[in-house]
Image (spheres, rainbow, N blue to C red):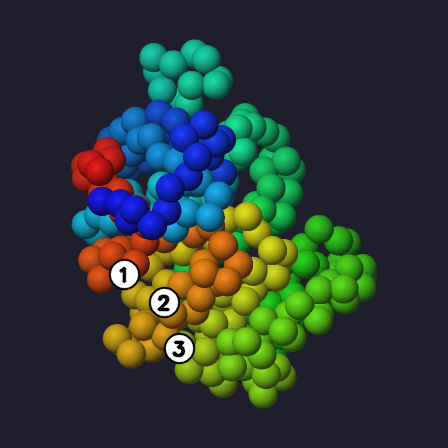
Protein backbone atom coordinates (compact mmCIF):
# COMPACT_ATOMS: atom_id res chain seq x y z
CA UNK A 1 0.00 0.00 0.00
CA UNK A 2 1.39 3.45 -0.84
CA UNK A 3 0.45 7.08 -0.57
CA UNK A 4 1.09 8.99 -3.82
CA UNK A 5 1.85 12.15 -1.83
CA UNK A 6 5.45 10.93 -1.39
CA UNK A 7 7.54 10.27 -4.49
CA UNK A 8 11.27 9.81 -3.80
CA UNK A 9 13.66 10.29 -6.70
CA UNK A 10 14.01 6.88 -8.40
CA UNK A 11 17.82 6.96 -8.32
CA UNK A 12 18.12 8.30 -4.76
CA UNK A 13 20.06 6.14 -2.32
CA UNK A 14 17.69 5.02 0.45
CA UNK A 15 18.21 6.40 3.92
CA UNK A 16 18.27 2.81 5.17
CA UNK A 17 18.09 -0.43 3.25
CA UNK A 18 17.67 -3.96 4.56
CA UNK A 19 18.91 -6.64 2.18
CA UNK A 20 18.12 -10.35 2.46
CA UNK A 21 17.55 -10.22 6.23
CA UNK A 22 17.39 -13.54 8.07
CA UNK A 23 17.03 -13.94 11.83
CA UNK A 24 16.51 -16.99 13.99
CA UNK A 25 16.61 -17.75 17.70
CA UNK A 26 17.59 -20.93 19.46
CA UNK A 27 14.85 -22.33 21.72
CA UNK A 28 16.42 -25.34 23.41
CA UNK A 29 17.40 -27.80 20.68
CA UNK A 30 15.23 -26.02 18.07
CA UNK A 31 16.12 -23.01 15.91
CA UNK A 32 13.07 -20.77 15.44
CA UNK A 33 13.23 -18.74 12.22
CA UNK A 34 11.69 -15.26 12.58
CA UNK A 35 12.80 -13.43 9.42
CA UNK A 36 13.32 -15.22 6.12
CA UNK A 37 15.00 -13.06 3.52
CA UNK A 38 13.36 -9.67 4.14
CA UNK A 39 14.13 -6.71 1.88
CA UNK A 40 13.03 -3.21 2.90
CA UNK A 41 14.06 0.40 2.27
CA UNK A 42 13.13 3.81 3.69
CA UNK A 43 13.93 7.02 1.81
CA UNK A 44 14.74 10.42 3.31
CA UNK A 45 11.51 12.09 4.41
CA UNK A 46 9.42 8.92 4.06
CA UNK A 47 6.93 7.59 6.62
CA UNK A 48 6.76 3.77 6.40
CA UNK A 49 4.60 1.43 8.47
CA UNK A 50 5.27 -2.26 9.12
CA UNK A 51 2.19 -4.33 9.87
CA UNK A 52 1.81 -7.95 10.87
CA UNK A 53 0.20 -10.24 13.38
CA UNK A 54 1.63 -10.80 16.86
CA UNK A 55 4.83 -12.84 16.60
CA UNK A 56 5.34 -12.10 12.91
CA UNK A 57 8.77 -10.56 13.53
CA UNK A 58 7.86 -6.85 13.30
CA UNK A 59 9.84 -5.78 16.37
CA UNK A 60 12.79 -7.97 15.39
CA UNK A 61 12.86 -6.30 11.98
CA UNK A 62 12.69 -2.83 13.54
CA UNK A 63 15.55 -3.66 15.92
CA UNK A 64 17.71 -4.77 13.00
CA UNK A 65 16.73 -1.64 11.02
CA UNK A 66 17.92 0.48 13.96
CA UNK A 67 21.17 -1.49 14.48
CA UNK A 68 19.97 -2.68 17.90
CA UNK A 69 20.30 -6.28 16.70
CA UNK A 70 22.22 -8.01 13.93
CA UNK A 71 20.85 -10.37 11.29
CA UNK A 72 22.10 -13.87 10.63
CA UNK A 73 24.32 -14.41 7.62
CA UNK A 74 22.37 -16.40 5.02
CA UNK A 75 23.99 -19.78 4.42
CA UNK A 76 24.00 -19.23 0.67
CA UNK A 77 25.30 -15.66 0.80
CA UNK A 78 29.06 -15.03 0.90
CA UNK A 79 29.14 -11.43 -0.38
CA UNK A 80 28.89 -8.84 2.41
CA UNK A 81 27.21 -6.28 0.14
CA UNK A 82 24.25 -8.56 -0.58
CA UNK A 83 22.78 -8.77 2.93
CA UNK A 84 22.43 -6.71 6.08
CA UNK A 85 21.63 -3.11 7.02
CA UNK A 86 22.87 -0.19 4.92
CA UNK A 87 22.70 3.46 5.96
CA UNK A 88 22.86 5.93 3.07
CA UNK A 89 24.47 3.19 1.02
CA UNK A 90 27.13 2.30 3.59
CA UNK A 91 27.17 -1.15 5.24
CA UNK A 92 26.28 -1.17 8.93
CA UNK A 93 25.94 -4.87 9.75
CA UNK A 94 29.66 -5.43 9.28
CA UNK A 95 30.77 -2.45 11.38
CA UNK A 96 32.41 -3.05 14.72
CA UNK A 97 30.49 -2.68 17.98
CA UNK A 98 31.50 0.95 18.58
CA UNK A 99 30.77 1.95 15.01
CA UNK A 100 27.20 0.66 15.31
CA UNK A 101 26.89 2.29 18.73
CA UNK A 102 27.87 5.71 17.34
CA UNK A 103 25.50 5.32 14.40
CA UNK A 104 22.57 4.44 16.69
CA UNK A 105 23.28 7.37 18.98
CA UNK A 106 23.80 9.96 16.24
CA UNK A 107 21.44 8.89 13.45
CA UNK A 108 18.60 6.84 14.98
CA UNK A 109 15.95 7.74 17.53
CA UNK A 110 13.83 5.08 19.23
CA UNK A 111 10.33 5.15 20.70
CA UNK A 112 8.98 2.01 22.38
CA UNK A 113 5.57 0.92 23.61
CA UNK A 114 6.58 0.97 27.28
CA UNK A 115 8.54 4.28 27.25
CA UNK A 116 11.73 2.97 28.96
CA UNK A 117 12.29 6.17 30.93
CA UNK A 118 14.70 5.99 33.87
CA UNK A 119 12.64 6.39 37.06
CA UNK A 120 15.45 7.99 39.08
CA UNK A 121 15.87 10.86 36.59
CA UNK A 122 13.53 13.79 36.06
CA UNK A 123 11.95 14.51 32.69
CA UNK A 124 14.60 16.94 31.46
CA UNK A 125 17.40 14.54 32.44
CA UNK A 126 15.67 11.65 30.65
CA UNK A 127 15.44 13.68 27.44
CA UNK A 128 19.13 14.64 27.65
CA UNK A 129 20.34 11.06 28.11
CA UNK A 130 21.28 10.39 24.45
CA UNK A 131 23.39 13.55 24.45
CA UNK A 132 25.29 12.29 27.51
CA UNK A 133 26.01 8.78 26.27
CA UNK A 134 29.20 9.41 24.24
CA UNK A 135 30.98 11.10 27.15
CA UNK A 136 32.70 9.63 30.22
CA UNK A 137 30.48 9.72 33.31
CA UNK A 138 32.19 12.73 34.85
CA UNK A 139 31.76 14.76 31.62
CA UNK A 140 28.22 13.64 30.74
CA UNK A 141 26.37 16.71 32.04
CA UNK A 142 28.93 19.04 30.45
CA UNK A 143 28.57 17.31 27.09
CA UNK A 144 24.78 17.49 27.25
CA UNK A 145 24.70 21.19 28.20
CA UNK A 146 24.59 22.52 24.59
CA UNK A 147 21.50 20.36 23.97
CA UNK A 148 19.62 21.67 26.99
CA UNK A 149 17.95 24.47 25.00
CA UNK A 150 16.85 21.94 22.37
CA UNK A 151 15.43 19.71 25.12
CA UNK A 152 13.54 22.61 26.67
CA UNK A 153 12.11 23.60 23.29
CA UNK A 154 11.02 20.02 22.54
CA UNK A 155 9.35 19.60 25.91
CA UNK A 156 7.63 22.96 25.53
CA UNK A 157 6.35 22.03 22.06
CA UNK A 158 4.95 18.81 23.52
CA UNK A 159 3.14 20.67 26.31
CA UNK A 160 5.51 19.54 29.05
CA UNK A 161 7.25 22.79 30.00
CA UNK A 162 5.74 22.64 33.49
CA UNK A 163 6.87 19.02 34.05
CA UNK A 164 10.64 19.40 33.79
CA UNK A 165 11.40 18.36 37.37
CA UNK A 166 8.78 15.62 37.53
CA UNK A 167 9.78 11.96 37.62
CA UNK A 168 8.21 9.52 35.13
CA UNK A 169 5.85 8.03 37.77
CA UNK A 170 4.29 11.48 38.18
CA UNK A 171 3.18 11.61 34.54
CA UNK A 172 0.32 10.08 32.58
CA UNK A 173 0.99 7.48 29.88
CA UNK A 174 0.61 10.02 27.10
CA UNK A 175 2.98 12.44 28.83
CA UNK A 176 5.57 9.70 29.29
CA UNK A 177 5.39 8.81 25.62
CA UNK A 178 5.86 12.46 24.60
CA UNK A 179 8.94 12.54 26.85
CA UNK A 180 10.18 9.39 25.10
CA UNK A 181 9.67 11.03 21.70
CA UNK A 182 11.55 14.14 22.84
CA UNK A 183 14.40 11.92 24.03
CA UNK A 184 14.44 10.15 20.65
CA UNK A 185 14.74 13.51 18.87
CA UNK A 186 17.36 15.21 21.05
CA UNK A 187 20.28 14.23 18.77
CA UNK A 188 18.30 15.21 15.65
CA UNK A 189 18.26 11.69 14.19
CA UNK A 190 17.96 10.96 10.50
CA UNK A 191 15.42 8.22 11.25
CA UNK A 192 12.84 7.84 14.01
CA UNK A 193 11.94 4.20 14.72
CA UNK A 194 8.73 3.60 16.68
CA UNK A 195 7.61 0.20 17.98
CA UNK A 196 3.84 0.21 18.70
CA UNK A 197 4.09 3.73 20.20
CA UNK A 198 0.33 3.85 20.91
CA UNK A 199 -0.06 0.24 21.99
CA UNK A 200 -0.07 1.01 25.72
CA UNK A 201 -2.43 3.99 25.48
CA UNK A 202 -6.18 4.55 25.26
CA UNK A 203 -7.60 5.63 21.90
CA UNK A 204 -7.72 9.37 22.63
CA UNK A 205 -4.21 9.51 24.08
CA UNK A 206 -2.90 7.29 21.29
CA UNK A 207 -4.30 9.68 18.71
CA UNK A 208 -2.51 12.59 20.41
CA UNK A 209 0.79 10.70 20.09
CA UNK A 210 0.12 10.04 16.41
CA UNK A 211 -0.57 13.74 15.95
CA UNK A 212 2.86 14.46 17.44
CA UNK A 213 4.53 12.06 14.98
CA UNK A 214 2.61 13.49 12.02
CA UNK A 215 3.56 17.02 13.02
CA UNK A 216 7.21 16.01 13.23
CA UNK A 217 6.99 14.48 9.80
CA UNK A 218 5.30 17.55 8.32
CA UNK A 219 7.35 20.30 9.96
CA UNK A 220 10.77 18.60 10.12
CA UNK A 221 10.41 16.19 7.19
CA UNK A 222 11.32 13.56 9.79
CA UNK A 223 11.84 10.10 8.32
CA UNK A 224 9.81 7.57 10.32
CA UNK A 225 9.62 3.78 10.43
CA UNK A 226 6.76 2.58 12.62
CA UNK A 227 5.65 -0.90 13.67
CA UNK A 228 1.93 -1.31 14.31
CA UNK A 229 -0.88 -3.84 14.24
CA UNK A 230 -3.47 -1.07 13.89
CA UNK A 231 -4.68 -0.37 10.31
CA UNK A 232 -5.75 3.15 11.28
CA UNK A 233 -2.17 3.93 12.32
CA UNK A 234 -0.71 2.39 9.17
CA UNK A 235 -3.14 4.41 7.04
CA UNK A 236 -1.28 7.58 8.04
CA UNK A 237 1.97 6.40 6.46
CA UNK A 238 3.14 6.95 2.89
CA UNK A 239 3.64 3.24 2.47
CA UNK A 240 2.72 0.10 4.41
CA UNK A 241 4.50 -3.24 4.19
CA UNK A 242 3.02 -6.42 5.63
CA UNK A 243 5.17 -8.99 7.39
CA UNK A 244 3.75 -12.50 7.13
CA UNK A 245 5.55 -15.69 8.16
CA UNK A 246 8.88 -13.88 8.22
CA UNK A 247 8.53 -12.37 4.75
CA UNK A 248 7.38 -9.04 3.35
CA UNK A 249 4.05 -9.09 1.53
CA UNK A 250 3.50 -5.60 0.09
Q: In the current view of this chain or complex, which residue is farthest to the bottom?
A: 162
Label of residue 210 in the image: 2
Seen from the viewer's position, the closer of residues 22 and 231 is 231
Could you say which is closer to the camera, residue 138 or residue 77? 77
**Disc 1: which residue:** 233
**Residue 250 position by quadrant:** top left
As helix, strand or loop, the secondary structure at mark 3 comes to helix
Q: Distance between the residues labelled 3 and 2?
A: 14 Å
Q: Nearer the viewer, mark 1 or mark 3?
A: 1
The relative height of residue 168 versus residue 83 in the rendered view (above or below) is below
First in sequence: mark 1 vs mark 3 = 3
Separation (CA) of disc 1 from disc 3: 18 Å
Q: Is mark 1 on a helix, strand or loop?
A: helix
Q: Residue at x 75, y 53 (%)?
A: 135
Q: Is residue 11 above or below residue 108?
A: above
Using the image, determine if residue 191 lies above or below residue 161: above
**In the rendered structure, are the residues bearing label 1 and label 2 in contact, judged by CB atoms less than 8 Å apart?**
yes
Q: Mark 3 points at which residue?
A: 173
Mark 1 is surrounded, within 10 Å at the Cα level, by few (under 14), some (14 to 19) or many (20 or more) other residues, namely some
Question: In the visual, does 241 lie left or right of 75?
Answer: left
Q: Which residue is drawn at 28% across and 49% down?
A: 3
Q: Mark 3–mark 2 contact, CB under 8 Å? A: no
Q: Find residue 80 and report its horizontal and vertical position in percent.
A: 48, 17
Task: Pinpoint residue 216: horizontal percent, then vertical percent.
Answer: 48, 63
114 to 136, vertically: above or below: below
The secondary structure type at the circle numbered 2 is: helix
Give x and y (percent) for residue 179. 51, 71
Q: Earlier in the sequence, mark 1 or mark 2?
A: 2
- x then y, percent, for residue 199: 30, 65
Residue at point 42%, 19% (across, down): 82
**Between residues 6 and 188, which one lies in front from this camera angle?**
6
Amino acid sequence: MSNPAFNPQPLAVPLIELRNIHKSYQLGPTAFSVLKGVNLHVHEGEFVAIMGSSGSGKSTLLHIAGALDSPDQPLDEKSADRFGLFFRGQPVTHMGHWGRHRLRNQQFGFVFQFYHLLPELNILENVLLPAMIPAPFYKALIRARPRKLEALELLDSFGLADRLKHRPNQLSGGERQRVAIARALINKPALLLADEPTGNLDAKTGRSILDVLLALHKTRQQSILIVTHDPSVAALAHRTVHLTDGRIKS
